[in-house]
Amino acid sequence: MKDALIAKARKKYHASLLQSVLTVNSQGVPSNADKDSKLSVRIAKGIAELLESEAGERLAGQTSGSEFEAINAEFIRDTFLGLNHIRPGHWEIKKIGNRNRMVIAGFEQYAHLTALDEASKNNPELAAALGNDYTITPDIIIVQNLLQDAELNKDEPIVDQNVSRRAAIRAINGGKPLLHASISSKWTIRSDRSQNSRSEALNLIRNRKGHLPHIVVVTAEPLPSRLASIALGTGDIDCVYHFALDELKQSVEMANAEDALEMLNIMIDGKRLKDISDLPLDLAI
């Protein structure tokens, strides 16, 4: 039987991580663990062993984060782009990082931010009032490109020049591509980092015109308590996706950490924490 697309991509995803950012140093500390937390090290080590990690030195935080973003983006390309039969469209997956704080102004829902940015540059009082609340730099984005009328009318006439003249998806209306998803990659989670993800999510919600893109976080954080700092609660982030949720749960069980397991089950049962393999199908909604 042929391997399922997402199952095969998940194996490739973990192999890529094991060859780069997911390492165990000479002291036995995995690169996604907090060395000052015995439980973090124990859980992360269990995950690494389950994923057949090779020993190696820990990479610098900045390098790890950037590489994690790239591998996440590749996983989404390998999976989401294979779902065109259930989510048709002209899609692009892009790794953005911190290159351009106004990158989302290139999309229909946030195009008005360009005028806002220009106005604040010329008005110090306005700039002081606005702060940076309207600037958002996603790690990874999914872009839905606009459709030509020939595509819309391929099977039967759907639109003509008299209707749907303001619909965002229609290229003839002169709009910009649509932001379908904003994906934040967090190799590990500390309190300040989780707040950054929430702030970015709230800015995406508040500053949009039109439909809200998917807003998700992907992380390799091993401690359930730290996962809870970003996964619990609703209203900002759609869901948190763990890079190896099944292995995380197994490792927590092996560590006999009852409180951590209880917290983990609360997040899983509450549909606030899912596995990376769930992400492509959720993005197809």
Image (cartoon, rainbow, N blue to C red):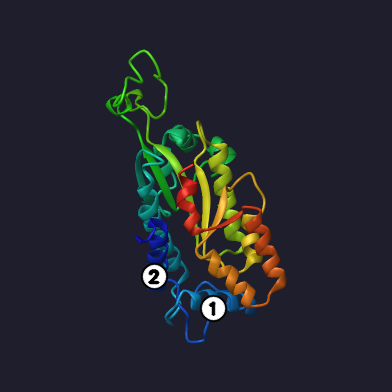
221 w.r.t. 122: above or below:
below
* Rendered residue at 60%/68% (across/down): 249
Give the left or right position of residue 110, taking residue 37 as reference: left
Q: Residues within 10 Å of mark 1 (few under 14, many from 20)?
A: many
* Rendered residue at 57%/63% (across/down): 189
> Which residue was labeled with disc 2?
15
Which residue sits furthest right?
Answer: 259
163 w.r.t. 63: above or below:
above
Which residue sits furthest front?
Answer: 1
State the separation of the CA atoms marked 2 and 1: 16 Å
> Which residue was labeled with disc 1?
45
Q: Residues within 10 Å of mark 2 (few under 14, many from 20)?
A: some
Between residues 132 and 29, which one lies in front from this camera angle? 29
Residue 52 in which image quadrant:
bottom left
The answer, for residue 236, to whether it is visible in the render is yes
Q: Amino acid at mark 2?
A: Ala
Which residue sits furthest bottom?
Answer: 26
* Rendered residue at 65%/60% (across/down): 228
Secondary structure beneath disc 1? helix
Between residues 100 and 263, which one lies in front from this camera angle? 263
Residue 188 percent coordinates (x, y): 54, 66
Residue 16 percent coordinates (x, y): 38, 68
Between residues 218 and 129, which one lies in front from this camera angle? 218
Secondary structure beneath disc 2? helix
Residue 250 in which image quadrant:
bottom right
How many marks overall? 2
Of mark 2 and mark 1, the one earlier in the sequence is: 2
Query: What quarter of the picture does the N terminus occupy?
Result: bottom left
Q: Amino acid at mark 1?
A: Lys
